[in-house]
Image (tube, grey):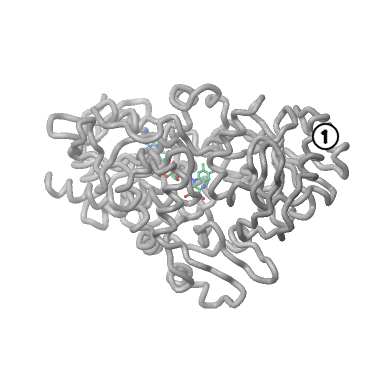
């Protein structure tokens, strides 16, 4: 091992959204900072680079959005209904989706600081744009936003990570690439640095405070099987191969408190022929989230979920688990021509598992692995399910549901009757894990006795307690930014007190 060196006041482990926000915030608060990234430079930024850049925050109407999206000044807004997404709505969504298990203190901080943090991100070079077309459909000549997500980051995940890293570079913060942290330097006074691997050697980097922002354990098949359960080792990983749970383990090794939904994770519908880990050339486009406008069938030819239970932003993160639980861990999504204009770009990429036919009889044998006879019965029953006389409207929960089926569809249940029919083969893609480290509202990591571990802070995916069972799209980047920023401030103050 090479001798230990003093690296900086604050050592940030990771280089994704949470880590970059943490580093920039520590710097703003007067600390010298160094970042450690396990990946090489061209793969930097973890899952943050793979995101579509959806960002959830509370806002009160178009004026709040105008402050975030200056381009709105040049737009004709007469035919766009923005509505609001108040703090109370955000709280309701977090409560409902997590079955009221989310940590109330952390949730409150995330929500109350969400709008101000989005504005702070702009000061760090991040740009936002409206999500017209993907989160607001044009109906009767008017766009109406639904699901509380009117904004995404310009350039998606790569745009976000580039913008933040430009600011990191401008601040003179060094990033050590291909330098995974493997342990914490720890004594009776708390954490004093990290042990890392560099060029095949173990090095010790001393600092006055450490921020762990190095992701969950979704990329470790062994940990997935151990904590999430049987068959999770078979799931595809939607993002980085570098989030192997090491950061969580390092903290547990020195007595940190595990918390949250350790057997839970965010997992979605993902192309059945996608590679084992994410591919930056495709980004998040292996995802197939428009099932509310069609039906799902499994290998037996049966439907197995209420595809229209809610907007996809509130179901997509738990339906990956439903697909994993089907025989063979796959399913097909079926659509007709009435809805193809509503399907996202992700349904038009080149690397896609797709079948197409003019009749269901022709389509059935093309659905690899599916019982064709039962599939035809399922479609017939679905198309005959009596539905109230309600108009289809993709911008609202339209109540156009089925009745009398073993599993009814609650909304957007139009008949499949306009050929050609399209089918898309999907499996389960794991996004990130929910269990992690317990932090307080200052981002300080707690020990198993509930006391802060001096000098240790955490932010992002490896924090436990925010998500249980399900997840509201766009809140991962927001929680990383909010607690990243807070952890930077707290770590800088800690470093100052230890100088
Ligand atoms: C395909 C996909 C699409 C998504 N879309 C969205 C979206 O639109 N909106 C949204 O809010 N969320 C989205 N998410 C979730 C989002 O990516 C995460 O919530 C968020 O990016 C987590 O940020 P993070 O900084 O905590 O982790 P990451 O961005 O994963 O960063 C972790 C970093 O730690 C590094 N690292 C890991 N181990 C070590 C180690 N031992 N030492 C040093 N470095 C290490 C990694 O290389 C990486 O740089 C998506 C995720 C995926 C996979």
Report if the beta carbon of the residue with label 1 is closer than 8 angstroms to ligand 1.
no
Q: Mark 1 points at which residue?
A: 364
Residue 338: x and y, percent?
78, 55
As rendered, which of 397 and 243 lies closer to the eye? 397
> Mark 1, residues whose alpha carbon is within 10 Å: few (<14), some, or many (≥20)?
many
Q: State the residue in front, 11 or 146.
A: 146
In-front residue for pair 117/230: 230
For the point 36% across and 59% down, the residue is 117
Please tell me in which quadrant of the rendered image residue 75 appears: bottom right
Q: Which residue is drawn at 63% across and 42% down?
A: 306
Task: Tell me if residue 77 comes above or below residue 102 in the rendering.
Answer: below
Using the image, determine if residue 497 lies above or below residue 188: below
Q: Position of residue 409 (x, y in %)?
A: 67, 45
**Could you say which quadrant of the image residue 143 lies in?**
bottom right
* Rendered view: 223 above or below 425: above
Task: Examine the rendering and report whether any part of residue 456 can be seen.
Answer: yes
Q: Answer with the quadrant where ligand 1 appears in the image.
A: top left
- At which x and y percent is residue 367? 78, 33
Position of residue 183 measured from the top left corner of the image (x, y, whole percent): 29, 29
In the picture, measured across the screen, residue 394 lies left or right of residue 61, that is right
Q: Which of 285 and 5 is in front in this view?
A: 285
- Left-right relation of 152 to 203: right
Number of numbered discs overlaid on the protein picture: 1
Side of 257 where 355 appears, left or right: right
């Amino acid at each position: 091992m090479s001798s230990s060196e003093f690296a900086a006041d604050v050592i940030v482990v990771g280089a994704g959204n949470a880590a970059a926000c943490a580093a920039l915030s520590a710097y703003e608060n007067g600390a010298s900072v160094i970042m450690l990234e396990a990946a090489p430079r061209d793969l930097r930024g973890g899952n943050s680079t793979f995101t579509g850049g959806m960002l959830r925050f509370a806002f009160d109407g178009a004026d709040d959005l105008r402050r975030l999206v200056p381009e709105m000044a040049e737009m004709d807004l007469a035919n766009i209904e923005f509505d609001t997404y108040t703090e109370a709505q955000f709280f309701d969504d977090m409560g409902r989706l997590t079955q009221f298990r989310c940590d109330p203190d952390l949730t409150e901080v995330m929500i109350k600081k969400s709008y101000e943090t989005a504005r702070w991100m702009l000061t760090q070079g991040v740009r936002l744009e409206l999500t017209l077309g993907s989160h607001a459909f044009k109906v009767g000549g008017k766009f109406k936003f639904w699901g509380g997500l009117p904004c995404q980051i310009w350039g998606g995940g790569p745009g976000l990570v580039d913008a933040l890293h430009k600011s990191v570079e401008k601040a003179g913060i060094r990033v050590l690439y291909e330098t995974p942290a493997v342990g914490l330097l720890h004594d009776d006074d708390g954490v004093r640095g990290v042990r890392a691997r560099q060029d095949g050697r173990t090095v010790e980097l001393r600092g006055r405070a450490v921020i762990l922002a190095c992701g969950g354990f979704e990329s470790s098949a062994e940990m997935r099987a151990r904590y999430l359960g049987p068959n999770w080792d078979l799931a595809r990983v939607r993002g980085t191969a570098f989030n192997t749970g090491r950061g969580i383990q390092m903290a547990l090794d020195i007595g940190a408190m595990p918390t949250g939904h350790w057997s839970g994770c965010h997992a979605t519908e993902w192309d059945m022929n996608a590679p084992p880990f994410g591919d930056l050339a495709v980004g998040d486009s292996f995802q197939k989230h428009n099932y509310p406008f069609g039906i799902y069938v499994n290998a037996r030819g049966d439907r197995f979920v209420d595809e229209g239970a809610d907007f996809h932003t509130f179901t997509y993160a738990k339906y990956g688990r439903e697909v994993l639980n089907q025989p063979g861990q796959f399913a097909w999504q079926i659509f007709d021509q009435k809805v193809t204009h509503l399907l996202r770009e992700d349904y038009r990429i080149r690397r896609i598992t797709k079948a197409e036919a003019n009749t269901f009889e022709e389509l059935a044998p093309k659905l690899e692995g599916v019982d064709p006879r039962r599939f035809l019965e399922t479609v017939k029953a679905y198309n005959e399910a009596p539905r109230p006389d309600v108009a289809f409207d993709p911008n609202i929960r339209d109540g156009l549901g089925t009745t009398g089926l073993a599993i009814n569809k609650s909304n957007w249940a139009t008949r499949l009757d306009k050929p050609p029919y399209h089918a898309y083969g999907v499996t389960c893609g794991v996004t990130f894990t929910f269990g992690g480290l317990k932090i307080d509202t200052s981002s300080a990591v707690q020990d198993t006795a509930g006391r802060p571990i001096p000098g240790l802070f955490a932010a992002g995916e490896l924090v436990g307690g925010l998500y249980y069972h399900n997840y509201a799209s766009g809140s991962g980047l927001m929680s990383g930014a909010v607690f990243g920023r807070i952890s930077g401030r707290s770590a800088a103050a800690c470093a100052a007190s230890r100088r």
